[in-house]
Image: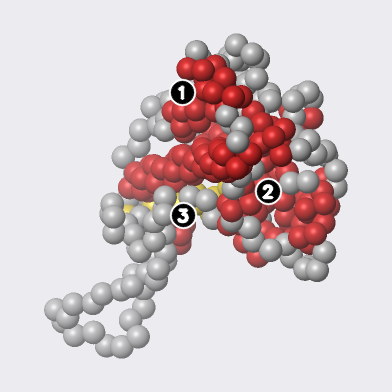
Amino acid sequence: SEGSSVGKEKLIFSMVAERDIGGGEEVTHAYDDLDNTSLLLTYGFVASAGEAPLTATARVPLSMLLDACKAVRDTRHADPFGPPWELREAWSAKQDACKRLLSIYGDEVAVSVQEPLPDVLLTVVQLMLMPVDDFEELIASEERPPLLDGSALDDEPEFAALVTDALLRALDAAIARYADAQSEHRSESSRAQAASLLRAGELEALRATQRSAVRLLGASREEAEVDEDDELSELGVQGEESEESEGEEEGVGHCDRDVTALSARAAGSTHVTLGASKDGTCEIHQTIGTVWKGTDRCAKRKRSHTD
């Protein structure tokens, strides 16, 4: 009833019957289809493991995504082997478009284990990092940008590398907001325990998104190599491919190593630091979120054969 309390904590809601209830009659109450975040904030409890109507979701603010994209922009602009398009062009217009897009989502993106890479998340990062011509074409006829999935990254490993880099940086920042479970004060409060369960679910969602982001890069790279092999077969080009295969066997190959290293980091490794290849074409650095630095031969070889 209203005004009652549990320990020193007053109940934050009351329940009022809409009809007379007989003695001994069993009454059930539905709390709607809510995830544990909404249950905790609204009613002060979380569902038991596996019993929540919706899986745990973690929120990534738009500001965090924009900061991550800006960091990628600044890093790659200073890189002599950066993308062949100017990342700084129309930056303010791109930000405004993303704000319009996320205005209906409360200026944040929700991710979960079941949906680690929602289209709205991919759309924001792609809009910020795509060539300005593509951006202007997308927003030319619509007030709010259309949602994009990961198909735009197929056969575009350079673009996929930028998007993956930004996603991992943003996710790193999102995870850093959570208190260290080992160092935080242990409380017997039921609400503190509920908050701990909620945090675990949200961190699981963020890490699932990390792993999915890394797979974007691997899938794009594989698609590019398949297309390249098909084109080389049509052109009858075999010599250079054989040389590159030998080089990769000697340890120069970089794409597999990049994807493996990023996958290990997303799976929960504390640090992944990989130096440059023998020919200086790639480097993975920073705690999280750095992808394919240097010449991207998987993409550039294709252009050299088709030009």
The N terminus lies in which quarter of the figure?
Answer: bottom left
Q: Secondary structure at mark 3?
A: loop
Residue situated in front as seen by the camera: 51 or 307: 307
Residue 41 vertical placement versus 156 (above, below):
below
Mark 3 residue type: Glu
The answer to which of 198 and 98 lies nearer the viewer is 98
Q: Amino acid at mark 1?
A: Thr
**Residue contact between numbered discs 2 and 1, judged by CB atoms under 8 Å:** no
| Among numbered discs 3 and 1, the one appearing first in the sequence | 3
| Residue type (three-letter) at the residue carrying disc 2 | Gln
| Picture layout, residue 305 above or below residue 79 | below
Q: Earlier in the sequence, mark 2 or mark 1?
A: 2
Q: Secondary structure at mark 2?
A: helix
- Number of on-image labels: 3
Number of the label disc, if any, that sits on residue 115:
3
Residue 169, located in which quarter of the rendered image?
A: top right
**Residue 30 location in percent, x, y?**
33, 72
Q: Could you say which is closer to the camera, residue 121 or residue 16?
A: 121
Residue in front for this viewpoint, 31 or 229: 229
Q: Give the distance between the C-alpha atoms of the residues marked 2 and 1, in whole angstroms.
A: 27 Å
Residue that numbered label 1 is attached to: 270
Which of pointers 2 and 1 indicates the residue nearer the eye?
Answer: 2
State which mark lies toward you, 2 or 3. 2
